[in-house]
Amino acid sequence: MTVSPPSGVAPGGFASVFNPALFAGKHVFVTGGSSGINLRIAEAFGEHGAKVSINGRKVDKLEAAVKGLREKKIQAEGYAADVRDFAAVDAALGAAHAKFGNIDVLVCGAAGNFPAPVAMMSSNGFKSVMDIDVLGSFNACRAAFERLTRPGVVIAISAPQAQVAYPMQAHVCAAKAGVDMLMKTLAMEWGSLGVRCVSIWPGPIDDTEGMQRLAGDPAVKKKVEALVPLLRFGTKDEVAQLALFLASPAAQYCTGSVYSVDGGMALVGGAMMSQAVQG
Ligand code: COA
């Protein structure tokens, strides 16, 4: 039986259900915020009144992203730093704090990925992703700690690979499991200080570097879409809306948990997904 997506499912571009002033005066810092899901998250907070600091490794990309945010009338600043370098991250958060004040929401979004089987992966390739994801998230949280508003929120952009094993993704699976456990531990250590720490698991999201690498070919994309229980890829905006909810007072009893926005993809299993990708 062929099931069509229900009509009325808007693949993005829907009006936000949140008050446009929800984050007025708040300061949101996003690592890896120059592009993709993280940039859309930064933009969505800005559209809801926040002052936005974004971090990225490449200065040109970062400057273009800041320019784009400002063109949308968002108060935005960019801070170049490799999240693997604690001194650089600390300096970036220090400068952002000096500019916009205490950080209300920290989004740990910087992540590495490339599809490769373990037998074709060097030790340094594995380490690069572990360092960007796990150490990078630790560095951002550690540097933000003294500069976080209480109550404050930390959101890690993790992935279903944290629990669903995917061939070609050993480094990402290990790294995202580490990121989730970092958030859970911080939720326990920082809960009494009023800081909530959560993870988001985006599934296959359209128009991202990650999905371009995994399912850039339209024929592969079609096969992956057919596996998704909701029969389509998600949008960056749908991930951003979850981030807004988790940072909002509506989620004030949420901490130490993982929230999927994946159309049900994590239920399907990594082997199915990789069969679709590898043909
Ligand atoms: N297959 C196998 N190994 C790869 C690879 C690939 N496609 N891409 C990078 N590597 C290896 C490199 O060979 C190198 O190992 P070596 O020194 O043993 O040769 C190691 O990874 C580091 O690569 P390098 O380019 O020096 O470092 P980097 O710090 O820039 O990190 C990435 C490389 C790929 C991890 C990083 O640039 C990245 O993740 N980019 C994509 C970002 C992205 O897609 N984000 C979305 C996340 S879902």
Image: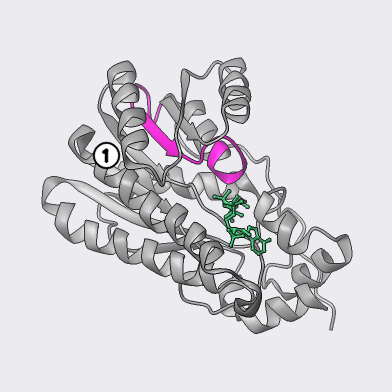
Which of the 4 image quarters holds residue 59?
top right
Which residue range is magenta in the image?
A: 21-39
Give residue 241's position: percent from left, percent from top.
51, 45
| Res. 268 visible in picture | no
- Pick whichever, 61 or 252, lies toward us: 61
The residue under the point 52% across, 44% down is 240
CA neighbours of label 1 inside 10 A, class few (<14), some (14 to 19), many (20+) = many
Residue identifier under label 1? 143
Instruction: Residue lying at the far left in this picture: please name it.
Output: 192
For this rendering, which residue is in front, 214 or 60?
60
Q: Residue furthest right?
A: 219
- Left or right relative to 89: residue 168: right
Relative to 142, does residue 273 appear above or below in the rendering? below
In which image quadrant can residue 220 be found?
Answer: bottom right
Element under disc 1 = helix
Rendered view: 161 above or below 235: below
Kindly tell me whether residue 126 is visible in this rendering.
yes
Residue at x 52%, y 68% (from the top left corner): 123
List x then y, in percent, for residue 166.
59, 77
Residue 33 lies in the magenta-colored region: yes
Residue 217 picture location, percent across and down:
85, 61
- Quadrant where the N terminus lies? bottom right
